[in-house]
Image (tube, helix red, strand yellow):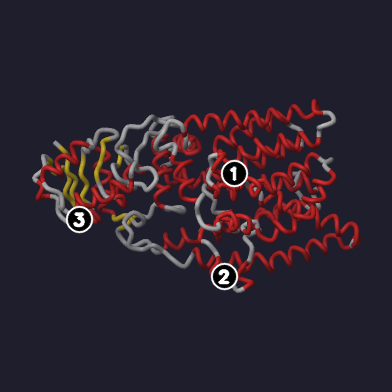
Amino acid sequence: MKKFRPGFFTFFIIGNLFFLLANTPLFLALQKTPQNTFYPLIHQGHMDYYLYLSAIRESLEGSWTMKSLFSGEHAPESFFYIYFIVLGKLGSLFRLNQIVSYHLGRIISIEFMLVSIYLLCQEVLGRRWAFYGAFLSLFSTVLPLMYFGKSTAFPGWWSGLDALGRMDYLPHHAFGIAAFFTTVYFIFRKKIISATIFAFFATLVFPPIGLVFFFSLPFTVFITFRQKIFQGYRFILISFSSMVALFLMKWQTNLGFPWSQWKYWEMGLWNDLPNVNLYIILGGGVLLFFSLPAVFYIFLKKQNFTYVFLAVWAILPYLLLPFTDLIGVSRIRMAYLGNFLPLAILSTLTVKTLSKRYFYRYGHLTAILFLFLFSLFSFPVSYYFFLNRNSYIPLGYINIFIPKEMMNSIAFLGKTAKPYSLVLSLDYSGNIFPAFIKVKSYFAHVAQTKDYGKKMPLVQKFYKGEMTGSEAEEFIRKNGIEYIYLGPIEKSFGNIEKYNLLIKPVYNEGGIVIYKVI
């Protein structure tokens, strides 16, 4: 621990306090869990949460790949969700279930990110100034438009760019970014083998980070070693390692649906969103503007490899925005390339340089005053997001607070149905099944169910009893459905008994009926 000054422990404690604050929605939901329901500690969006749990469950049960579990069509298996597959293997060593494994992965990833942030700040800024850079990076937030009377201008997804949102990253995002920060640390330490290994795993877990290795590192090598390029060749190995991981993940997305959804569904959702480019730029917050003097100075000098790399990395997401369609990535990913860290380091370098030149005797006092001014901009914004995040607990949703009767029926289905049987239900129910048992859901997830928009009216029409008997029979047989689930949501739509289908009830308890197709 000699590497760290007391500033690290202060930063680490504050960081974990923010991690606890970021989890207050989860704690509140747990506290308000209705009687006779099960709350599976949902983190962020419930649909994707159950997707990640299903990947962990598959791994816990012995698989090294994942099947398409949220749609009835055949699809090749994939290791696309490699992070959660590895989590499952670690969970199996300690006999942990998928929920505990997921949240343990969250904790490990966030702690890893905190340590990697401080290590990199210490490497660039030195031990005396590392705390200031780490503090700025962790607690930076979006531009405070509310100061200009435009509080309603905040888009909802901006909360992910806030300090609390950063501490609430999805576990694979946090781990990938932390591994990337560690890679950069090893690059600056000229430990090429270690950097090459971490670059591979960072990109494998969080593929968008490969863009930084692909663009920033070669460009930095070119402009800093152009007179003696042979000295910079070793850094290209790191980019090559990242590209190998990126190729592996591209291979997985090229397998087709649903593994391609990470690319195409996200691009369709975000790339044509009004003002998305502007909001991503403003999402850089005040640090983007504080760091610009350092960026311009570094590009004029073009001498220091470390500083040039940081400057390129800091502005790369904004430079790539016009080319996201060409690159084949969602624009929202540009906001999650970890550039909050170089922005913070460069801002600290600006303050450090000015204080040494003009306020030599009061260097740290200058830094403290700067942090105070920064806090005046940032903390009110974070407080706004904190209140917003805790203002709504989704009570009454059976896919969030799952009735015990429903969990019992799911357990029964898991024990009696053959592996990967196809179950028909509405998406509220179908989204849950693969997270806990080895079955496939016909209609379950807005991105993972093929032709979700086309299937929705058909499934609803079936449960409302609006099909003819022959239409219902054809619907069941044509899609290879093996079980029909009638839970609380499905029963609220109507009655399917009028169809006289060739089915038999295999479960009828607590108001829930499961039919097996004969």
Q: Which residue is mark 2?
A: 151
- Percent x, y of residue 126: 80, 48
Which is more foreground, mark 2 or mark 3?
Answer: 2
Question: Quadrant location of residue 285?
Answer: bottom right
Label 2 residue SS: helix
Q: Amino acid at mark 3?
A: Lys
Q: Amino acid at mark 2?
A: Ser
Tell whether 52 sits left or right of 18.
Answer: left
* First-in-chain label (3 vs 1): 1
- Percent x, y of residue 175: 57, 42
Q: Quadrant of the C terminus?
A: top left
Q: Residues within 10 Å of mark 1 (few under 14, many from 20)?
A: few
**Furthest residue in direction top, as rendered:** 230
In this rendered view, identify the residue nearer to me: 295 or 131.
Answer: 295
Q: Which residue is mark 1?
A: 323
Question: Quadrant location of residue 59?
Answer: top left
In this rendered view, identify the residue nearer to me: 208 or 172.
Answer: 208
Q: Which residue is mark 3?
A: 491
